[in-house]
Amino acid sequence: MTGVFVLRRLAHAVVLLLLVSTLSFVLLEVAPGDFLDEARMNPRMGPGTLAALRDRYGLSQPMPVRYLRWMSAVARGDFGVSFAYNMPVTTLVLPRARKTLTITVTALAIAWIVALPLGIWCASSKARWLDSLFAVGTSSLITVPDLLFTFVMLFIAVRCGLWKEGSMVLPAAVLSALAMPPLLRHVRAAMLDAARQPFVRAARAHGIAGVRLWVRQVLPAAANPLVSLLGLSMGTLLSSSLVVEAITGYPGLGPLFLDAVAARDFYLVLGPVMLSAAFLVGASLIADLLLYAVDPRIREPR
């Protein structure tokens, strides 16, 4: 049964990546302009030279042919050649993808390490002032735009002499701070919902209370929504990391992706898009497997 579940989830992941690749390719194709727009404005570039460049970059071929050739190359691990850099996209993207994945996983770990015990503490606390402070604080932080928050954090780091270009400390700190408020709210809500279950009330009636009750009884009951939240939080951090990297100067996928979009570097745009989609699908797959491991109801045959 485990093998069937894994194969089904892998099939879903492959279908999702195919849909993302098709939609991304079509949207880039129908978007106005291409990499040779600037060359067309050069009076020294004649029609023959432009036609030769289009043939060289494969832009003269029909879209279905280009897409099928690109997909067959992607299946071999080749994302094409960057027009601007005249280099394989894989060579440009993979080192930056590792950096993006490093700060994302680091920020995710920090956010969960802080949010899980703090959320449990807030849920178990009987002080109403703490509950009100928690609600106001998390709601206020969630409403702050990622762009504004990153600029403020960068300004503080520069003024305090804590910012170093290329360092992962600031972007990881910003990402973890952005992820923490929604995580805190979801952890608290999941714990409070699990605490209302009949078996928890029965455990209280048998004298189980305090940390033992919340960690051994309530937390396992709240595991399902929290495991599902793990995949969602990974996706949220990956999307936020593109903005944070571009602002803080961290050499991840964000700056490269923005440069590629500005230059209309077709295949260099598709590379980060596909890798980001693969990261999201991978995080969702890991969350599904964890949910399968902790929830026996999923393992029941249907």
Image (spheres, rainbow, N blue to C red):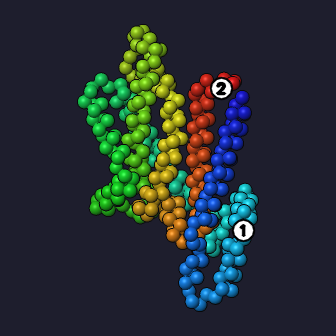
For marks 1 and 2, the one nearer the N-term is: 1
The amino acid type found where label 1 is placed reads: Pro
Question: Residue 181 placed where, x, y %?
Answer: 38, 41
Q: Quadrant of the N terminus?
A: top right
Out of 24 and 268, give the one closest to the viewer.
24
Circle 2 residue: 299
Out of 225 and 121, give the one closest to the viewer.
225
Q: Residue at x 46, y 20 (%)?
A: 217
Q: Quadrant of residue 164?
A: bottom left
140 versus 244 height, above or below: above
Viewed as shown, does residue 74 lie left or right of 248?
A: right
Out of 101 and 12, give the one closest to the viewer.
12
Q: Residue at x 61, y 87 (%)?
A: 45
Circle 1 residue: 62
Q: Quadrant of residue 187?
A: top left
The amino acid type found where label 2 is placed reads: Arg
Label 1 Cα crowd, 10 Å radius (few <14 / some 14-19 / many 20+): few
Q: Quadrant of residue 203?
A: top left
Question: Residue 121 placed where, x, y %?
Answer: 36, 29
Question: Residue 13 placed where, x, y %?
Answer: 65, 45
Question: Residue 184 placed where, x, y %?
Answer: 39, 37
Q: Quadrant of the C terminus?
A: top right
Viewed as shown, does residue 245 lie left or right of 124?
A: right
| Mark 1 → mark 2, Cα distance in angstroms | 47 Å
